[in-house]
């Protein structure tokens, strides 16, 4: 197993066939991102235009990226040790500045957002580099590669924070593109070249648990926002129905991700011979549409609660249908990686949501919400029955094979 020897004093101990638990310091760090996710959804709600959607998407991508990079680093470093805890606490402070800057990131707080983001990305990587023993060559080279890429993107983040209007958006798109492309090219830089798959050993079970925790954060945020909105409204029949629909939709999303998918993903990556490759695809990239779908669904829940009657406008249709659709796209791709086949229930749900979106303007926001919730519940039940059927067929297949 790579990296078993020559561990640095701040690195986790690797125990065969046992994954490291998520520490309390990591959980505390994650709480900052409850606030960040709330800020992203509220920002989209306040600026639901094509430009506002593009800006909010960029902000959401940056929030996810800074969180997932921290999860990779704490997969290697041990948060039970004081220096690593101090790093997480400093990153929490940066995360709070980042989160509070989100609503005005394309207005008066752009430079604050950029400085906080760049400082978190570059500062964390410098700490990782300094914590890695010199004899651990592969890890040090990886830290140097990542530092070069993140330092390059930081230039564009800061420049964008100084600029205004479209120039800021363009520069930040370039910065984010640099960061999202870098893992694909394995952080290639002159002289050092690109990293290899063996260089990216991760403790798979721990990383899977961390990403599952972020999904819980996003779902919890949507439930909290829905409950807060519901508490401030007059409890008419339509409002109560909209609240129940939003709650059931959140439960369906939880079921679709956690009932079998999260556990299967954790088991697969824990036993994989190339956990780094699987972590990059399934947990770094394919969780993005899952998180985006939850955030967009939370926006829909808020809109429907406040205006359940009348005809659905473009904002309602896009959020009410687009949220569950993004979630299903993310989960079908994630489960394809861990199971090896495309889940028919999810594919049918995506098609059904597309048809529903075509006729969405003809329905009231409440009826559209109920219809999308019903589809998500059907997909969840269908998948559960399908997996139970496959599990029931497995012993039969083994018996037939033995007879043959």
Image (cartoon, grey):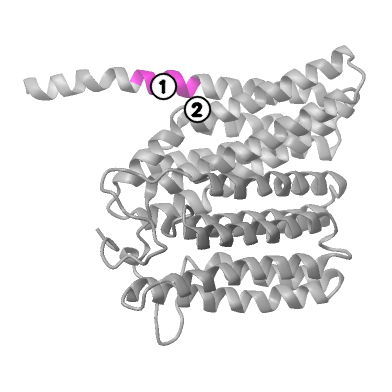
Classify residue 384 as left or right of residue 30. left
Q: Main secondary structure of the magenta part?
A: helix
Classify residue 61 as left or right of residue 342. right
Residue matched to label 1: 386
The span shown in magenta is 382-389
Quadrant into which the N terminus falls: bottom left
- Of 205 and 379, which appears nearest the observer? 205
Residue 111 position (above or below residue 57): below
Q: Is tag 2's residue or tag 1's residue first in the polypeptide sequence? A: 2
**Residue 345, label in figure:** 2
Q: Quadrant of residue 198?
A: bottom left
Q: Image point 72% across, 21% down: which residue?
A: 245
Report whether residue 235 is seen: yes
- Of 391 and 229, which appears nearest the observer? 229
- Report if the CB atoms under discs 2 and 1 are less than 8 Å apart: yes
Q: Quadrant of residue 18?
A: top left
Q: Image point 79% across, 21% down: which residue?
A: 242
């Amino acid at each position: 197993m790579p990296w078993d020897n020559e561990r640095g004093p701040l690195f986790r101990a690797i125990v065969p066939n046992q994954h490291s638990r998520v520490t309390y310091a990591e959980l505390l760090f994650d709480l900052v991102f409850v606030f960040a996710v709330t800020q992203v959804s509220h920002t989209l709600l306040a600026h639901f235009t094509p430009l506002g959607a593009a800006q909010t998407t960029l902000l959401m991508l940056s929030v996810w990226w800074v969180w997932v990079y921290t999860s990779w680093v704490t997969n290697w470093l041990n948060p039970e040790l004081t220096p690593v805890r101090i790093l997480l606490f400093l990153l929490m402070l940066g995360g709070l500045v980042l989160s509070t800057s989100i609503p005005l990131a394309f207005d008066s707080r752009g430079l604050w957002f950029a400085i906080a983001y760049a400082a978190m990305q570059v500062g964390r990587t410098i700490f990782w580099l300094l914590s890695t023993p010199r004899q651990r060559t592969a890890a040090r080279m990886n830290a140097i590669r990542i530092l070069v890429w993140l330092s390059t993107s930081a230039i564009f983040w800061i420049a964008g924070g100084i600029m205004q209007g479209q120039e800021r958006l363009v520069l930040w798109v370039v910065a984010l593109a640099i960061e999202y492309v870098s893992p694909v090219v394995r952080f290639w830089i002159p002289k050092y070249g690109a990293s290899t798959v063996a260089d990216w050993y991760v403790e798979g079970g721990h990383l899977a648990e961390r990403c599952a925790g972020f999904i819980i954060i996003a779902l919890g945020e949507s439930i909290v926002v829905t409950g807060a909105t519901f508490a401030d409204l007059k409890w008419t029949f339509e409002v109560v129905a909209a609240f129940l629909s939003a709650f059931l939709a959140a439960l369906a999303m939880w079921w679709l991700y956690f009932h079998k998918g999260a556990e299967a993903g954790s088991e697969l990556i824990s036993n994989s011979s190339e956990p780094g490759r699987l972590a990059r695809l399934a947990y770094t990239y394919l969780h993005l549409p899952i998180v985006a779908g939850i955030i967009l669904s939370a926006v829909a829940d808020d809109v429907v609660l406040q205006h359940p009657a009348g005809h659905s406008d473009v904002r309602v249709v896009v959020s009410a249908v687009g949220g569950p659709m993004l979630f299903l796209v993310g989960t079908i791709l994630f489960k394809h990686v861990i199971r090896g086949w495309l889940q028919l229930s999810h594919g049918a749900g995506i098609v059904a949501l597309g048809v529903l979106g075509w006729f969405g303007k003809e329905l009231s926001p409440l009826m559209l919400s109920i219809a999308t919730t019903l589809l998500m519940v059907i997909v969840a039940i269908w998948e559960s029955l399908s997996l139970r059927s496959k599990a029931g067929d497995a012993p039969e297949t083994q018996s037939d094979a033995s007879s043959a």
